[in-house]
Image: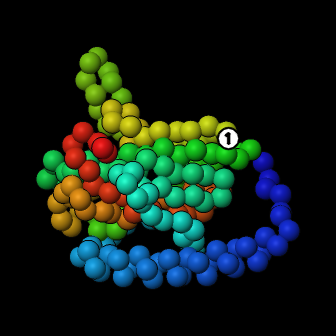
Amino acid sequence: MARRARPNDGRRRGVRRLASFAAAGWLAIGALIFGVTTCGSSEARNSSPSVTGSGSRAGSGTGSADIGSLHISGAYIPQQTSQDEAAAYFAVTNKGDAADELVAVQATGAAQAMLHDTVEDGGVGTMTAMSDLTIPAHQTVRLTPGHEHLMIMNPVRRLAQGQTLVLTLTFTHAGSVSLVVPVVGLTGPA
C-alpha cells in the first residue's frame, strides 16, 4: 500500500533530520556520562536514521517513544543474570491505517541486539531468531517474557538495576527511533 504524500512532507523530514542530529548529540553526551560505549551493532536497513523521540517517563520505571503512527511503551530490561546476554521487553502500538515492521534493533553498549521468539515443543522452550516483527494497523504487539522478546548480546558491562541502555528501533515505514530503557529488578518494573 503506497503512502500518500502530506503537504509540507519534505519540510517535516528536514525538521526530523535536524532533531535527529540534536538528539543524537545529547544521547552521545549521556552515554559518555554514564560510561556506556558502543562495541558494535546489528545492521539497520535505514541508512539515515532519524531520532524523533527518546526518554523514560519519570516515575513509570519504563521507557517510551513515538515515531510516526507508532507508540513504543513499557520498555524495560530485567537486571542481567546471564554472563553474556540480557532481554528487553516493550509494547508497540500502531495507530495508523497500515501495518509496519520492526526490522532492526541496536543497543548502545552491546555487541548485538536481535529479536527472538520462544517456541515450546513438548514442554521444552527454545529461542529462535526473528528477522522482523509485524505491527498490524490499529493493534498493539507486546514483547513479553516467554514469548517474543529482544535479546541483548554481550553488553560491555553487566546490566544492573538502576542503569539505563539506549535502544534504537528501526521500522520499515516509520523510520528509526531511540529510547532510553531502564534496567529494573528481576521481576520487572515496579
Residue 124: image location, x then y, percent: 25, 23
Horizontally, residue 181 falls left or right of residue 173, namely left
Vertically, is 107 above or below 20? above
Residue at 17% from the left image edge and 60% from the top image edge: 158
Residue 186: image location, x then y, percent: 21, 43
Q: Closest to the observer: 152 or 180?
A: 180
Q: Closest to the observer: 59 or 113?
A: 59
Identify which amino acid the numbered label 1 is placed on. Ala
Horizontally, residue 4 falls left or right of residue 171, namely right
- Residue corresponding to mark 1: 137
**Can residue 140 be seen by looking at this rendering?**
yes
Vertically, is 16 above or below 85? below
Dot 1: element: loop
**Can residue 111 be seen by looking at this rendering?**
no
Residue at 57% from the left image edge and 68% from the top image edge: 52
Q: Closest to the observer: 182 or 148?
A: 182
Task: Identify the image quadrant of residue 187.
Answer: top left
Horizontally, residue 39 falls left or right of residue 166, namely left
Residue 10: image location, x then y, percent: 77, 75
Identify the residue at the far right of this view: 7
Identify the residue at the far top of this view: 122
Residue at 70% from the left image edge and 74% from the top image edge: 13
Task: Identify the image quadrant of residue 160.
Answer: bottom left
Vertically, is 148 above or below 1? above
Residue 125: image location, x then y, percent: 28, 28
Label 1 environment density (alpha carbons within 10 Å; few <14, some 14–19, many ≥20): some
Badge count: 1
Query: Which corner quadrant holds the C terminus?
Result: top left
